[in-house]
Image (cartoon, rainbow, N blue to C red):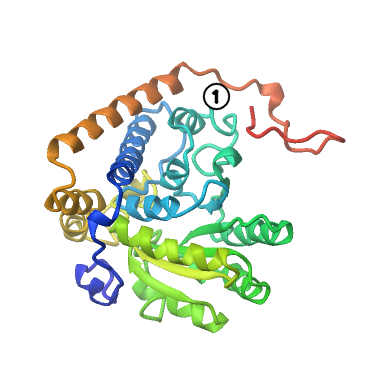
Amino acid sequence: MMCGSICQYRGIMSQETNVHDHDKSNLREMYRQMKLTREVELALLDLVEAGEIPGDAHMCNGQEASAVGTCFALDDDDLITGTHRSHGHVLAMGTDVNELLAEFGGKKTGVGGGRGGEFHLYDPENGVFETSAVVGASVPHGAGAALSSQIDNDDRVTVAFFGDGASNEGVVFETMNMAAIWDLPIVFLCENNQYAVSTSSDYSIPTDDISDRATAFDMPGKTIDGQDVLTVYDEVSEAVAAARNGEGPQFVECETYRYFGHFSAEQDLLGDRPYRTEEEIQEWRENRDPLKLFKDRVTDAGVMDDSEFEDIDHAVDETVEEAVEFMRDSEEPAGERALETIYAEDNVQPAPKYR
């Protein structure tokens, strides 16, 4: 597998789904969610660079199809656990865009009351069990959620998102082993975006596909084209159905790519020592962009035309502009509430959202 090369897709499952097999309203919504994720993140980057939001931005631009296709395959009661790059995941699950941007800004109106920022998101009303900046933590957390579902017999499936870097963490293997022993209803969803910070998956992973590792746990595993939202939807739907039907944990690797660095200030640290070329980034942008691939397929099939996509783009732009203003106008959380939800109180149930 040549890292960053388009030719790596020769061995990756990318079934040519008939666009006409999908309802037009679903196709529109898939595109809207991918576009929304991209524009929300670009707004986040602008706000971080302008100093309006503290810290750095950890962008998932380029990975929208993996997030949307996966979450589109879930039922309303299903759960996800995520990473430091989970903006697309939570938006695809239905988290309110105003509340998400407010959370990025540490505001009282944020989905976590301003406590989690961009890393530690929590939205149980929309199936977001948690996201975590701790590499690999989403996997045991997801298994815990799946174990609860198994005990309660509630028919839920949990998808645990993690990256190629996390796939080398011991806790991931330990959790996969436990999940296999207990036949947990979980899908391990590895988003291989080619780099763990600056370390390429070519260098750090000896197998052709990360999904090959599932074999050690007698677990079904497959590697798919993570830039094709319809392929992701179809293949993850199969994995989710298998997990829900009692067939045990499933493993899906989405081959994808992030256009930006590991975090927004990365270039300041790297200086003249880049770990990938501009040519590589442009190759993915021009030839494997998930939004462009989707538009081309749908328009070629005659299901939607350019004007319909332009209408969606315009609506998304308005939504994001309103969300930015909502974040700016929102109150800062009161300092005296800093320790709330840290310590348990007798006979007090936690609120659905940390407000």
Q: Secondary structure at mark 1?
A: loop
- In the visual, does 147 lie left or right of 319? right
Q: Residue furthest right?
A: 346
Residue 26 placed where, x, y %? 33, 45
Residue 257 seen in this snapshot = no
Tell me what residue is drawn at x 33 percent, y 53 percent: 65
81 lies above or below 115: below
Residue 250 placed where, x, y %? 51, 70
Residue 132 vs residue 53, the one in the foreground: 132
187 lies above or below 60: below
Tell me what residue is drawn at x 44 percent, y 68 percent: 252
User: What residue sits right under mark 1 in the picture?
Assistant: 109
Residue 275 seen in this snapshot = yes
Q: Quadrant of residue 199?
A: bottom left
Q: Quadrant of residue 315?
A: top left
For disc 1, the neighbor class at 10 Å (few under 14, some 14 to 19, many from 20) is many
Residue 48 placed where, x, y %? 39, 33
Tell me what residue is drawn at x 62 percent, y 75 percent: 180
Residue 142 placed where, x, y %? 60, 58
Check disc 1 and give the amino acid type.
Answer: Thr
